[in-house]
Protein backbone atom coordinates (compact mmCIF):
# COMPACT_ATOMS: atom_id res chain seq x y z
CA UNK A 1 0.00 0.00 0.00
CA UNK A 2 1.44 3.36 -0.96
CA UNK A 3 1.80 6.27 1.47
CA UNK A 4 -1.02 8.25 -0.16
CA UNK A 5 -3.57 5.57 0.59
CA UNK A 6 -3.11 6.03 4.35
CA UNK A 7 -4.69 9.40 5.08
CA UNK A 8 -4.44 9.12 8.86
CA UNK A 9 -0.70 9.61 8.70
CA UNK A 10 -1.16 12.97 7.03
CA UNK A 11 -3.52 14.91 9.30
CA UNK A 12 -3.40 15.86 12.94
CA UNK A 13 -6.44 14.12 14.44
CA UNK A 14 -5.21 11.75 17.11
CA UNK A 15 -7.07 8.47 16.79
CA UNK A 16 -6.51 5.58 19.13
CA UNK A 17 -4.14 2.92 17.93
CA UNK A 18 -6.94 0.37 17.95
CA UNK A 19 -9.12 2.33 15.57
CA UNK A 20 -6.21 2.87 13.20
CA UNK A 21 -5.57 -0.86 13.07
CA UNK A 22 -9.23 -1.61 12.46
CA UNK A 23 -10.23 -2.10 8.85
CA UNK A 24 -13.98 -1.88 9.52
CA UNK A 25 -16.33 0.94 10.49
CA UNK A 26 -18.74 1.09 13.41
CA UNK A 27 -22.02 2.68 12.42
CA UNK A 28 -24.86 3.74 14.67
CA UNK A 29 -28.17 3.22 12.89
CA UNK A 30 -30.65 4.86 15.19
CA UNK A 31 -32.13 5.43 17.81
CA UNK A 32 -33.63 8.27 15.79
CA UNK A 33 -32.84 7.66 12.19
CA UNK A 34 -35.23 8.12 9.27
CA UNK A 35 -34.58 4.56 8.12
CA UNK A 36 -35.58 2.89 11.37
CA UNK A 37 -39.22 4.12 11.42
CA UNK A 38 -39.29 3.98 15.18
CA UNK A 39 -37.06 4.40 18.18
CA UNK A 40 -34.57 1.58 18.21
CA UNK A 41 -30.88 1.37 17.59
CA UNK A 42 -28.61 -0.92 15.65
CA UNK A 43 -24.89 -0.73 16.15
CA UNK A 44 -23.42 -2.12 12.97
CA UNK A 45 -19.91 -3.16 12.14
CA UNK A 46 -19.51 -2.59 8.41
CA UNK A 47 -16.74 -3.34 5.97
CA UNK A 48 -17.34 -0.85 3.17
CA UNK A 49 -20.97 -1.50 2.29
CA UNK A 50 -21.09 -4.99 3.76
CA UNK A 51 -22.65 -5.61 7.16
CA UNK A 52 -20.50 -7.83 9.36
CA UNK A 53 -22.26 -7.66 12.68
CA UNK A 54 -25.36 -6.01 14.12
CA UNK A 55 -26.22 -5.45 17.76
CA UNK A 56 -29.78 -4.22 18.26
CA UNK A 57 -30.68 -2.18 21.34
CA UNK A 58 -34.35 -1.93 22.18
CA UNK A 59 -36.48 -0.65 25.03
CA UNK A 60 -36.40 3.09 24.31
CA UNK A 61 -40.17 3.43 24.65
CA UNK A 62 -40.85 0.72 27.22
CA UNK A 63 -43.96 1.79 29.16
CA UNK A 64 -44.41 -1.17 31.56
CA UNK A 65 -47.85 -2.13 30.23
CA UNK A 66 -47.77 -5.52 31.91
CA UNK A 67 -47.17 -3.90 35.30
CA UNK A 68 -49.80 -1.21 34.73
CA UNK A 69 -52.31 -3.89 33.70
CA UNK A 70 -52.03 -5.50 37.15
CA UNK A 71 -53.66 -2.42 38.68
CA UNK A 72 -56.31 -1.69 36.05
CA UNK A 73 -59.84 -3.02 35.72
CA UNK A 74 -60.34 -5.05 32.57
CA UNK A 75 -61.93 -2.33 30.47
CA UNK A 76 -59.09 0.09 31.25
CA UNK A 77 -56.55 -2.28 29.71
CA UNK A 78 -58.01 -1.87 26.22
CA UNK A 79 -56.33 1.54 25.71
CA UNK A 80 -53.01 -0.05 26.67
CA UNK A 81 -53.39 -2.63 23.90
CA UNK A 82 -53.95 0.22 21.43
CA UNK A 83 -50.43 1.34 21.99
CA UNK A 84 -48.77 -1.97 21.22
CA UNK A 85 -49.04 -2.17 17.45
CA UNK A 86 -50.49 1.28 16.83
CA UNK A 87 -50.72 0.65 13.08
CA UNK A 88 -53.50 -1.89 13.66
CA UNK A 89 -54.79 -1.13 17.13
CA UNK A 90 -58.37 -2.43 16.52
CA UNK A 91 -56.99 -5.97 16.14
CA UNK A 92 -55.26 -5.66 19.51
CA UNK A 93 -58.45 -4.27 21.09
CA UNK A 94 -60.57 -7.10 19.72
CA UNK A 95 -58.01 -9.69 20.76
CA UNK A 96 -58.14 -8.38 24.31
CA UNK A 97 -61.95 -8.36 24.39
CA UNK A 98 -61.98 -11.91 23.06
CA UNK A 99 -59.55 -12.98 25.80
CA UNK A 100 -61.96 -11.75 28.47
CA UNK A 101 -64.91 -13.27 26.62
CA UNK A 102 -63.07 -16.58 26.60
CA UNK A 103 -62.50 -16.24 30.36
CA UNK A 104 -66.19 -15.47 30.89
CA UNK A 105 -67.34 -18.13 28.44
CA UNK A 106 -69.36 -15.67 26.35
CA UNK A 107 -70.74 -16.49 22.95
CA UNK A 108 -71.35 -13.51 20.67
CA UNK A 109 -74.17 -13.04 18.16
CA UNK A 110 -73.08 -13.67 14.58
CA UNK A 111 -73.74 -10.09 13.50
CA UNK A 112 -71.36 -8.75 16.14
CA UNK A 113 -68.66 -11.21 15.13
CA UNK A 114 -68.98 -10.22 11.46
CA UNK A 115 -68.79 -6.54 12.38
CA UNK A 116 -65.62 -7.31 14.31
CA UNK A 117 -64.21 -9.13 11.29
CA UNK A 118 -64.84 -6.04 9.16
CA UNK A 119 -62.98 -3.82 11.63
CA UNK A 120 -60.09 -6.25 11.98
CA UNK A 121 -59.66 -6.66 8.24
CA UNK A 122 -59.78 -2.90 7.70
CA UNK A 123 -57.00 -2.44 10.20
CA UNK A 124 -55.03 -5.24 8.58
CA UNK A 125 -55.28 -3.38 5.28
CA UNK A 126 -54.10 -0.12 6.86
CA UNK A 127 -51.23 -1.91 8.63
CA UNK A 128 -50.04 -3.60 5.44
CA UNK A 129 -50.45 -0.40 3.43
CA UNK A 130 -48.10 1.42 5.79
CA UNK A 131 -45.55 -1.36 5.71
CA UNK A 132 -45.55 -1.90 1.97
CA UNK A 133 -45.52 1.75 1.00
CA UNK A 134 -42.67 2.35 3.44
CA UNK A 135 -40.64 -0.40 1.77
CA UNK A 136 -41.14 1.58 -1.43
CA UNK A 137 -40.02 4.80 0.30
CA UNK A 138 -36.86 3.12 1.53
CA UNK A 139 -36.06 1.96 -1.98
CA UNK A 140 -36.52 5.53 -3.18
CA UNK A 141 -40.09 5.56 -4.51
CA UNK A 142 -42.16 8.15 -2.66
CA UNK A 143 -45.17 8.35 -4.98
CA UNK A 144 -46.89 5.06 -4.07
CA UNK A 145 -46.62 6.01 -0.40
CA UNK A 146 -48.44 9.33 -0.75
CA UNK A 147 -50.96 7.64 -3.02
CA UNK A 148 -52.12 4.81 -0.74
CA UNK A 149 -51.92 6.92 2.41
CA UNK A 150 -55.11 8.66 1.30
CA UNK A 151 -56.80 5.29 1.66
CA UNK A 152 -55.39 4.66 5.07
CA UNK A 153 -56.95 8.02 5.88
CA UNK A 154 -60.31 6.73 4.61
CA UNK A 155 -60.00 3.67 6.86
CA UNK A 156 -59.32 5.96 9.80
CA UNK A 157 -62.44 7.94 8.93
CA UNK A 158 -64.47 4.74 9.14
CA UNK A 159 -62.94 4.02 12.58
CA UNK A 160 -63.71 7.59 13.60
CA UNK A 161 -67.34 7.14 12.58
CA UNK A 162 -67.62 3.95 14.64
CA UNK A 163 -65.68 4.71 17.81
CA UNK A 164 -64.70 8.37 17.69
CA UNK A 165 -60.95 8.06 17.38
CA UNK A 166 -58.50 7.24 14.64
CA UNK A 167 -55.12 5.85 15.58
CA UNK A 168 -55.44 4.54 19.12
CA UNK A 169 -59.00 3.45 18.77
CA UNK A 170 -60.14 1.77 22.01
CA UNK A 171 -62.81 0.25 19.80
CA UNK A 172 -65.39 -2.23 21.04
CA UNK A 173 -66.20 -3.44 24.53
CA UNK A 174 -66.33 -6.83 26.22
CA UNK A 175 -69.21 -8.59 24.50
CA UNK A 176 -69.41 -6.44 21.39
CA UNK A 177 -69.31 -2.76 20.53
CA UNK A 178 -69.99 0.35 22.57
CA UNK A 179 -72.73 1.42 20.13
CA UNK A 180 -74.24 0.26 16.89
CA UNK A 181 -72.64 1.13 13.55
CA UNK A 182 -74.19 4.28 12.11
CA UNK A 183 -75.56 4.32 8.55
CA UNK A 184 -72.77 6.78 7.72
CA UNK A 185 -70.14 4.23 8.65
CA UNK A 186 -71.62 1.73 6.20
CA UNK A 187 -71.70 4.46 3.53
CA UNK A 188 -68.04 5.23 4.14
CA UNK A 189 -67.20 1.54 4.14
CA UNK A 190 -68.96 0.96 0.82
CA UNK A 191 -67.27 3.99 -0.66
CA UNK A 192 -63.91 2.64 0.45
CA UNK A 193 -64.62 -0.79 -1.01
CA UNK A 194 -65.64 0.77 -4.31
CA UNK A 195 -62.63 3.03 -4.78
CA UNK A 196 -59.81 1.22 -3.02
CA UNK A 197 -59.30 -1.74 -5.42
CA UNK A 198 -58.50 0.62 -8.27
CA UNK A 199 -55.87 2.40 -6.21
CA UNK A 200 -54.43 -0.87 -4.97
CA UNK A 201 -54.13 -2.12 -8.54
CA UNK A 202 -52.24 1.01 -9.47
CA UNK A 203 -50.01 0.64 -6.42
CA UNK A 204 -49.18 -2.89 -7.53
CA UNK A 205 -48.66 -1.76 -11.12
CA UNK A 206 -46.14 0.81 -9.90
CA UNK A 207 -44.08 -1.64 -7.88
CA UNK A 208 -44.73 -5.36 -8.34
CA UNK A 209 -42.97 -5.79 -11.68
CA UNK A 210 -40.85 -2.67 -11.59
CA UNK A 211 -37.34 -3.76 -12.59
CA UNK A 212 -35.66 -1.31 -10.19
CA UNK A 213 -37.84 -2.32 -7.26
CA UNK A 214 -37.39 -6.02 -7.96
CA UNK A 215 -33.62 -5.73 -8.26
CA UNK A 216 -33.54 -3.93 -4.95
CA UNK A 217 -35.79 -6.37 -3.07
CA UNK A 218 -35.20 -9.83 -4.45
CA UNK A 219 -32.61 -11.65 -2.37
CA UNK A 220 -32.39 -8.95 0.29
CA UNK A 221 -32.63 -10.09 3.89
CA UNK A 222 -33.72 -13.69 3.31
CA UNK A 223 -34.49 -16.26 5.99
CA UNK A 224 -35.28 -19.94 5.57
CA UNK A 225 -38.50 -21.49 6.85
CA UNK A 226 -36.58 -23.62 9.38
CA UNK A 227 -34.76 -20.65 10.86
CA UNK A 228 -37.92 -18.52 10.85
CA UNK A 229 -39.87 -21.14 12.80
CA UNK A 230 -36.98 -21.64 15.18
CA UNK A 231 -37.00 -17.90 15.82
CA UNK A 232 -40.75 -17.94 16.48
CA UNK A 233 -41.75 -15.93 13.41
CA UNK A 234 -45.48 -15.57 12.78
CA UNK A 235 -47.68 -13.59 10.44
CA UNK A 236 -46.69 -12.34 6.98
CA UNK A 237 -42.98 -12.68 7.76
CA UNK A 238 -43.37 -16.41 8.42
CA UNK A 239 -45.71 -16.90 5.47
CA UNK A 240 -43.15 -15.24 3.19
CA UNK A 241 -40.84 -18.17 3.94
CA UNK A 242 -43.50 -20.62 2.74
CA UNK A 243 -45.16 -21.74 5.98
CA UNK A 244 -48.95 -21.34 5.75
CA UNK A 245 -49.57 -20.69 9.45
CA UNK A 246 -52.34 -18.16 10.01
CA UNK A 247 -54.17 -17.97 13.35
CA UNK A 248 -57.39 -17.05 11.52
CA UNK A 249 -57.36 -20.51 9.93
CA UNK A 250 -55.48 -22.57 12.51
CA UNK A 251 -57.55 -21.49 15.51
CA UNK A 252 -60.50 -19.54 14.11
CA UNK A 253 -61.92 -16.82 16.34
CA UNK A 254 -64.78 -14.40 15.73
CA UNK A 255 -66.36 -16.73 13.10
CA UNK A 256 -63.42 -16.66 10.69
CA UNK A 257 -64.32 -20.25 9.85
CA UNK A 258 -67.37 -18.93 7.95
CA UNK A 259 -65.23 -17.07 5.46
CA UNK A 260 -63.58 -18.26 2.31
CA UNK A 261 -60.10 -16.83 1.82
CA UNK A 262 -56.63 -17.83 0.74
CA UNK A 263 -53.37 -17.56 2.68
CA UNK A 264 -50.74 -16.06 0.39
CA UNK A 265 -47.30 -17.60 0.91
CA UNK A 266 -43.85 -16.83 -0.43
CA UNK A 267 -40.91 -19.10 -1.17
CA UNK A 268 -37.55 -17.73 -0.01
CA UNK A 269 -38.53 -15.24 2.68
CA UNK A 270 -36.75 -12.19 1.26
CA UNK A 271 -37.99 -8.60 1.18
CA UNK A 272 -39.84 -9.11 -2.10
CA UNK A 273 -41.68 -12.16 -0.75
CA UNK A 274 -42.76 -10.28 2.35
CA UNK A 275 -43.95 -7.41 0.18
CA UNK A 276 -45.92 -9.73 -2.11
CA UNK A 277 -47.46 -11.67 0.79
CA UNK A 278 -48.72 -8.45 2.34
CA UNK A 279 -50.14 -7.30 -1.00
CA UNK A 280 -51.91 -10.63 -1.38
CA UNK A 281 -53.33 -10.33 2.11
CA UNK A 282 -54.74 -6.90 1.37
CA UNK A 283 -56.74 -8.42 -1.51
CA UNK A 284 -57.94 -11.26 0.72
CA UNK A 285 -58.97 -8.75 3.38
CA UNK A 286 -61.02 -6.81 0.84
CA UNK A 287 -62.76 -10.05 -0.14
CA UNK A 288 -63.41 -10.94 3.52
CA UNK A 289 -65.02 -7.55 4.13
CA UNK A 290 -67.29 -8.06 1.10
CA UNK A 291 -68.30 -11.48 2.41
CA UNK A 292 -68.94 -10.11 5.88
CA UNK A 293 -71.18 -7.37 4.54
CA UNK A 294 -73.15 -9.94 2.54
CA UNK A 295 -73.54 -12.15 5.61
CA UNK A 296 -74.71 -9.22 7.74
CA UNK A 297 -77.22 -8.24 5.06
CA UNK A 298 -78.52 -11.80 4.96
CA UNK A 299 -78.94 -11.91 8.74
CA UNK A 300 -80.74 -8.58 8.76
CA UNK A 301 -83.08 -9.64 5.97
CA UNK A 302 -83.96 -12.84 7.78
CA UNK A 303 -84.22 -11.41 11.29
CA UNK A 304 -84.97 -7.65 11.10
CA UNK A 305 -84.59 -7.27 14.87
CA UNK A 306 -80.93 -8.28 14.52
CA UNK A 307 -80.21 -4.82 13.10
CA UNK A 308 -80.08 -3.46 16.62
CA UNK A 309 -77.80 -6.17 17.99
CA UNK A 310 -74.30 -4.88 18.62
CA UNK A 311 -73.32 -6.71 21.79
CA UNK A 312 -74.05 -9.99 23.53
CA UNK A 313 -76.92 -9.75 26.02
CA UNK A 314 -75.06 -12.07 28.42
CA UNK A 315 -72.25 -9.52 28.62
CA UNK A 316 -74.56 -7.00 30.32
CA UNK A 317 -72.40 -6.80 33.42
CA UNK A 318 -69.45 -5.68 31.37
CA UNK A 319 -71.28 -3.45 28.93
CA UNK A 320 -71.98 0.16 29.86
CA UNK A 321 -75.73 0.81 29.42
CA UNK A 322 -76.98 3.46 27.00
CA UNK A 323 -76.81 7.01 28.38
CA UNK A 324 -80.57 7.60 28.24
CA UNK A 325 -81.14 4.45 30.32
CA UNK A 326 -78.54 5.57 32.85
CA UNK A 327 -80.45 8.79 33.39
CA UNK A 328 -83.87 7.20 33.67
CA UNK A 329 -83.48 3.65 34.99
CA UNK A 330 -82.24 2.67 38.43
CA UNK A 331 -80.74 -0.65 37.34
CA UNK A 332 -78.81 0.91 34.46
CA UNK A 333 -77.42 3.60 36.74
CA UNK A 334 -76.16 1.01 39.21
CA UNK A 335 -74.41 -0.98 36.49
CA UNK A 336 -72.96 2.13 34.96
CA UNK A 337 -71.47 3.07 38.33
CA UNK A 338 -70.19 -0.40 39.07
CA UNK A 339 -68.54 -0.78 35.68
CA UNK A 340 -66.92 2.65 35.70
CA UNK A 341 -65.57 2.17 39.22
CA UNK A 342 -64.19 -1.19 38.15
CA UNK A 343 -66.22 -3.21 40.61
CA UNK A 344 -66.94 -6.08 38.25
CA UNK A 345 -65.09 -9.23 39.20
CA UNK A 346 -64.01 -11.69 36.56
CA UNK A 347 -63.90 -15.41 37.37
CA UNK A 348 -60.57 -16.97 38.31
CA UNK A 349 -58.86 -18.72 35.43
CA UNK A 350 -55.92 -18.99 33.11
CA UNK A 351 -56.41 -18.12 29.45
CA UNK A 352 -54.21 -17.88 26.40
CA UNK A 353 -55.89 -16.34 23.41
CA UNK A 354 -54.24 -15.48 20.12
CA UNK A 355 -55.38 -13.40 17.17
CA UNK A 356 -53.73 -12.76 13.84
CA UNK A 357 -52.43 -9.22 14.13
CA UNK A 358 -50.85 -7.16 11.39
CA UNK A 359 -47.45 -8.64 12.22
CA UNK A 360 -48.37 -12.10 13.39
CA UNK A 361 -49.76 -13.94 16.35
CA UNK A 362 -50.73 -11.43 19.04
CA UNK A 363 -51.23 -13.51 22.17
CA UNK A 364 -52.72 -12.61 25.53
CA UNK A 365 -51.76 -14.79 28.47
CA UNK A 366 -54.10 -13.80 31.28
CA UNK A 367 -54.15 -15.16 34.82
CA UNK A 368 -57.14 -13.98 36.82
CA UNK A 369 -57.44 -14.65 40.55
CA UNK A 370 -61.09 -13.66 40.56
CA UNK A 371 -60.57 -9.98 41.27
CA UNK A 372 -61.26 -6.82 39.35
CA UNK A 373 -57.82 -6.72 37.74
CA UNK A 374 -55.66 -9.42 36.16
CA UNK A 375 -53.23 -11.16 38.47
CA UNK A 376 -50.79 -11.32 35.59
CA UNK A 377 -51.13 -10.35 31.96
CA UNK A 378 -48.50 -11.09 29.38
CA UNK A 379 -48.63 -9.89 25.80
CA UNK A 380 -47.09 -12.10 23.17
CA UNK A 381 -45.81 -9.41 20.85
CA UNK A 382 -44.82 -10.80 17.43
CA UNK A 383 -42.39 -7.92 16.70
CA UNK A 384 -40.40 -8.54 19.83
CA UNK A 385 -39.98 -12.18 18.97
CA UNK A 386 -39.02 -11.93 15.31
CA UNK A 387 -36.87 -8.81 15.55
CA UNK A 388 -34.15 -10.84 17.27
CA UNK A 389 -33.51 -12.58 13.95
CA UNK A 390 -32.54 -9.26 12.35
CA UNK A 391 -28.74 -9.57 12.89
CA UNK A 392 -28.80 -12.99 11.25
CA UNK A 393 -30.92 -11.78 8.33
CA UNK A 394 -28.72 -8.83 7.39
CA UNK A 395 -25.35 -10.47 8.01
CA UNK A 396 -23.08 -10.33 4.94
CA UNK A 397 -25.62 -8.24 3.05
CA UNK A 398 -25.35 -4.64 1.95
CA UNK A 399 -26.15 -1.79 4.31
CA UNK A 400 -28.93 -0.61 1.98
CA UNK A 401 -30.43 -4.12 2.09
CA UNK A 402 -30.37 -3.96 5.88
CA UNK A 403 -32.49 -0.80 5.75
CA UNK A 404 -35.21 -2.31 3.54
CA UNK A 405 -35.09 -5.56 5.52
CA UNK A 406 -35.93 -3.56 8.61
CA UNK A 407 -38.90 -1.86 6.96
CA UNK A 408 -40.14 -5.09 5.38
CA UNK A 409 -40.19 -6.79 8.80
CA UNK A 410 -42.58 -4.03 9.88
CA UNK A 411 -41.03 -3.62 13.30
CA UNK A 412 -43.33 -1.33 15.29
CA UNK A 413 -41.55 0.24 18.25
CA UNK A 414 -44.69 0.22 20.39
CA UNK A 415 -45.12 -3.51 20.00
CA UNK A 416 -41.40 -4.17 20.36
CA UNK A 417 -41.05 -2.40 23.70
CA UNK A 418 -44.51 -2.89 25.23
CA UNK B 1 -55.93 -33.62 13.54
CA UNK B 2 -54.72 -36.82 15.09
CA UNK B 3 -53.08 -35.51 18.21
CA UNK B 4 -55.29 -34.84 21.21
CA UNK B 5 -54.67 -33.70 24.78
CA UNK B 6 -55.23 -37.27 25.99
CA UNK B 7 -52.60 -38.72 23.65
CA UNK B 8 -50.09 -36.05 24.69
CA UNK B 9 -50.71 -36.80 28.36
CA UNK B 10 -50.40 -40.55 27.74
CA UNK B 11 -47.14 -40.20 25.81
CA UNK B 12 -45.58 -37.94 28.40
CA UNK B 13 -46.70 -40.11 31.31
CA UNK B 14 -45.26 -43.19 29.58
CA UNK B 15 -41.92 -41.43 29.25
CA UNK B 16 -41.61 -39.46 32.49
CA UNK B 17 -44.08 -41.19 34.79
CA UNK B 18 -44.97 -39.52 38.06
CA UNK B 19 -42.51 -36.63 37.63
CA UNK B 20 -45.02 -34.58 35.65
CA UNK B 21 -47.80 -33.31 37.88
CA UNK B 22 -50.74 -30.89 38.08
CA UNK B 23 -52.37 -31.98 34.82
CA UNK B 24 -55.10 -29.54 33.91
CA UNK B 25 -56.92 -28.48 30.77
CA UNK B 26 -58.06 -24.87 31.40
CA UNK B 27 -59.99 -23.58 28.38
CA UNK B 28 -58.84 -26.50 26.25
CA UNK B 29 -55.10 -25.96 26.69
CA UNK B 30 -53.23 -28.93 28.15
CA UNK B 31 -51.22 -27.67 31.13
CA UNK B 32 -48.83 -29.53 33.39
CA UNK B 33 -45.99 -28.99 35.81
CA UNK B 34 -42.44 -30.13 35.23
CA UNK B 35 -39.72 -30.31 37.93
CA UNK B 36 -37.47 -27.27 37.44
CA UNK B 37 -34.34 -29.24 36.59
CA UNK B 38 -36.16 -31.32 33.96
CA UNK B 39 -37.54 -28.51 31.78
CA UNK B 40 -35.01 -29.05 28.98
CA UNK B 41 -35.38 -32.84 29.02
CA UNK B 42 -39.14 -32.61 28.62
CA UNK B 43 -38.97 -29.93 25.92
CA UNK B 44 -36.30 -31.87 24.03
CA UNK B 45 -38.53 -34.95 24.14
CA UNK B 46 -41.52 -32.92 22.96
CA UNK B 47 -39.37 -31.54 20.14
CA UNK B 48 -37.78 -34.79 18.99
CA UNK B 49 -40.66 -37.21 19.39
CA UNK B 50 -42.07 -38.13 15.99
CA UNK B 51 -45.62 -38.13 17.28
CA UNK B 52 -45.61 -35.01 19.48
CA UNK B 53 -43.51 -32.63 17.34
CA UNK B 54 -43.81 -29.51 19.52
CA UNK B 55 -41.26 -27.50 17.58
CA UNK B 56 -42.56 -23.96 17.91
CA UNK B 57 -42.04 -21.86 21.03
CA UNK B 58 -44.98 -19.46 21.10
CA UNK B 59 -44.36 -17.71 24.35
CA UNK B 60 -42.17 -17.75 27.43
CA UNK B 61 -42.86 -15.72 30.52
CA UNK B 62 -42.87 -15.84 34.31
CA UNK B 63 -45.35 -15.25 37.11
CA UNK B 64 -44.62 -14.28 40.69
CA UNK B 65 -46.62 -15.93 43.52
CA UNK B 66 -45.31 -14.41 46.77
CA UNK B 67 -47.50 -16.72 48.90
CA UNK B 68 -46.14 -20.00 47.56
CA UNK B 69 -43.14 -20.49 49.86
CA UNK B 70 -40.20 -22.18 48.20
CA UNK B 71 -41.69 -21.94 44.70
CA UNK B 72 -42.42 -18.24 44.35
CA UNK B 73 -41.48 -17.86 40.70
CA UNK B 74 -43.12 -19.79 37.93
CA UNK B 75 -41.79 -19.93 34.37
CA UNK B 76 -44.47 -20.68 31.78
CA UNK B 77 -43.75 -22.03 28.31
CA UNK B 78 -46.36 -22.13 25.54
CA UNK B 79 -45.45 -24.64 22.86
CA UNK B 80 -47.21 -25.21 19.56
CA UNK B 81 -47.31 -28.20 17.24
CA UNK B 82 -47.88 -26.52 13.88
CA UNK B 83 -48.45 -29.78 12.02
CA UNK B 84 -51.27 -31.12 14.18
CA UNK B 85 -52.22 -27.59 15.25
CA UNK B 86 -52.34 -28.12 18.98
CA UNK B 87 -50.95 -26.06 21.84
CA UNK B 88 -49.37 -27.04 25.14
CA UNK B 89 -48.44 -25.13 28.29
CA UNK B 90 -45.77 -26.30 30.67
CA UNK B 91 -44.83 -24.70 33.95
CA UNK B 92 -41.90 -24.91 36.29
CA UNK B 93 -41.59 -23.43 39.76
CA UNK B 94 -38.38 -22.17 41.34
CA UNK B 95 -37.61 -20.55 44.73
CA UNK B 96 -37.03 -16.80 44.63
CA UNK B 97 -33.69 -17.01 46.48
CA UNK B 98 -32.28 -19.35 43.88
CA UNK B 99 -34.15 -18.87 40.58
CA UNK B 100 -32.01 -21.09 38.36
CA UNK B 101 -33.56 -22.49 35.18
CA UNK B 102 -31.87 -24.15 32.22
CA UNK B 103 -32.05 -22.06 29.07
CA UNK B 104 -34.05 -23.16 26.04
CA UNK B 105 -31.91 -21.19 23.59
CA UNK B 106 -30.21 -24.33 22.28
CA UNK B 107 -33.60 -25.66 21.23
CA UNK B 108 -35.29 -22.45 20.10
CA UNK B 109 -33.32 -19.41 18.89
CA UNK B 110 -36.40 -17.32 19.65
CA UNK B 111 -36.04 -18.06 23.36
CA UNK B 112 -33.04 -15.74 23.49
CA UNK B 113 -34.88 -12.43 23.87
CA UNK B 114 -37.87 -13.98 25.62
CA UNK B 115 -35.53 -15.26 28.34
CA UNK B 116 -33.75 -11.93 28.51
CA UNK B 117 -37.13 -10.25 29.02
CA UNK B 118 -38.06 -12.75 31.73
CA UNK B 119 -34.71 -12.15 33.44
CA UNK B 120 -35.18 -8.41 33.11
CA UNK B 121 -38.57 -8.37 34.84
CA UNK B 122 -38.43 -11.34 37.22
CA UNK B 123 -34.77 -12.10 37.73
CA UNK B 124 -34.94 -15.69 36.53
CA UNK B 125 -31.36 -16.86 36.06
CA UNK B 126 -31.27 -18.85 32.84
CA UNK B 127 -28.23 -21.12 33.08
CA UNK B 128 -26.32 -21.36 29.82
CA UNK B 129 -27.93 -18.35 28.15
CA UNK B 130 -25.42 -16.76 25.73
CA UNK B 131 -26.14 -13.15 26.70
CA UNK B 132 -28.28 -12.81 29.81
CA UNK B 133 -28.49 -9.01 30.20
CA UNK B 134 -31.41 -6.61 30.58
CA UNK B 135 -33.34 -5.92 27.41
CA UNK B 136 -36.16 -3.41 27.96
CA UNK B 137 -35.12 -1.72 31.21
CA UNK B 138 -31.96 0.33 31.73
CA UNK B 139 -28.79 -1.59 32.50
CA UNK B 140 -28.28 0.22 35.83
CA UNK B 141 -31.56 -1.04 37.28
CA UNK B 142 -30.87 -3.14 40.41
CA UNK B 143 -34.25 -4.78 40.99
CA UNK B 144 -36.76 -6.86 39.06
CA UNK B 145 -39.83 -4.67 38.60
CA UNK B 146 -42.53 -7.22 37.77
CA UNK B 147 -42.21 -8.95 41.15
CA UNK B 148 -45.21 -8.37 43.34
CA UNK B 149 -43.31 -6.57 46.11
CA UNK B 150 -43.04 -3.49 43.89
CA UNK B 151 -46.47 -1.87 43.88
CA UNK B 152 -47.64 0.25 40.97
CA UNK B 153 -48.59 3.26 43.08
CA UNK B 154 -46.43 5.05 45.60
CA UNK B 155 -47.43 3.33 48.89
CA UNK B 156 -46.84 6.47 50.95
CA UNK B 157 -49.58 8.45 49.22
CA UNK B 158 -52.76 8.52 51.26
CA UNK B 159 -55.07 9.65 48.45
CA UNK B 160 -54.23 6.55 46.47
CA UNK B 161 -54.95 4.21 49.36
CA UNK B 162 -58.48 3.32 48.39
CA UNK B 163 -60.00 0.71 50.63
CA UNK B 164 -63.29 1.01 48.80
CA UNK B 165 -62.20 -0.20 45.43
CA UNK B 166 -59.92 -3.16 45.77
CA UNK B 167 -56.17 -3.45 45.37
Image (cartoon, rainbow, N blue to C red):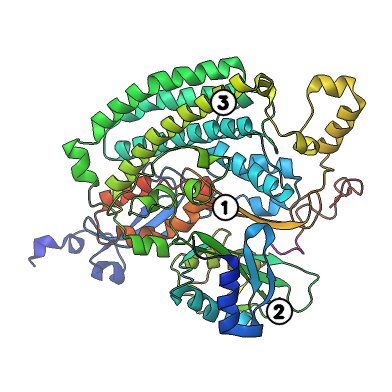
Disc 2 element: loop
Q: From the viewer's perspective, is the residue at label 1 or at label 3 nearer?
A: 3
Q: Is residue A280 magenta?
A: no
Residue drawn at point x = 53 percent, y = 36 percent: A120
Subunit under mark 1 = A
Q: Are marks 1 and 3 in contact (CB under 8 Å)?
A: no
Q: Which residue is mark 1?
A: A363
Chain for numbered disc 2: B
Q: Residues within 10 Å of mark 1 (few under 14, many from 20)?
A: many
Quadrant in which residue A33 is drawn: top left
**Residue A174 located left or right of residue A228:** right
The percent coordinates of residue A45 (x first, y second) are 31, 62
Q: Do discs 2 and 3 share a chain?
A: no
In the picture of the structure, the residue carrying the numbered disc 3 is A296
Magenta segment includes B145: yes
Q: Give the CA distance from mark 2 to mark 3.
A: 57 Å
Q: Is residue A143 left or right of residue A33?
A: left
Q: Which residues are magenta?
A: B144-150
Disc 2 marks which residue?
B97
Vertically, is B149 above or below A355? below
Give whichever of discs 1 and 3 has the lower sequence position: 3
Vertical position of residue B32 compared to residue A113: above or below: below
Dominant secondary structure of the magenta stretch? loop
Percent x, y of residue A282: 39, 35
Amino acid sequence: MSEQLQPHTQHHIKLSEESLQKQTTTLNLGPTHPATHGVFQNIMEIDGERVLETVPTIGYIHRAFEKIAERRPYYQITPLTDRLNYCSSPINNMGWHMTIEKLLGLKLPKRVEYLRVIIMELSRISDHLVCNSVIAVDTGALTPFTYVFQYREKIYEIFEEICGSRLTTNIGRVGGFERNFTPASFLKLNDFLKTFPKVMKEFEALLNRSRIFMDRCIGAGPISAERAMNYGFTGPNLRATGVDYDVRVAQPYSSYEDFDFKIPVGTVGDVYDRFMVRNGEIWESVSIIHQALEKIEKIEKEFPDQKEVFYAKEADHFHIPAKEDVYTKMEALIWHFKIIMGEIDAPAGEVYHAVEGGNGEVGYYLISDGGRTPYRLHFRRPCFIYYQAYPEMVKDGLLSDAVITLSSLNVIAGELDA
Amino acid sequence: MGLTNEIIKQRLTDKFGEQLTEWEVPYGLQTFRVPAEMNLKVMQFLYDDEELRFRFLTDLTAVHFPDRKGEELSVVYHLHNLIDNIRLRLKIYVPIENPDVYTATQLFSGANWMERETYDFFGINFIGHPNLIRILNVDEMDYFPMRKEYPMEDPTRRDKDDEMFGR
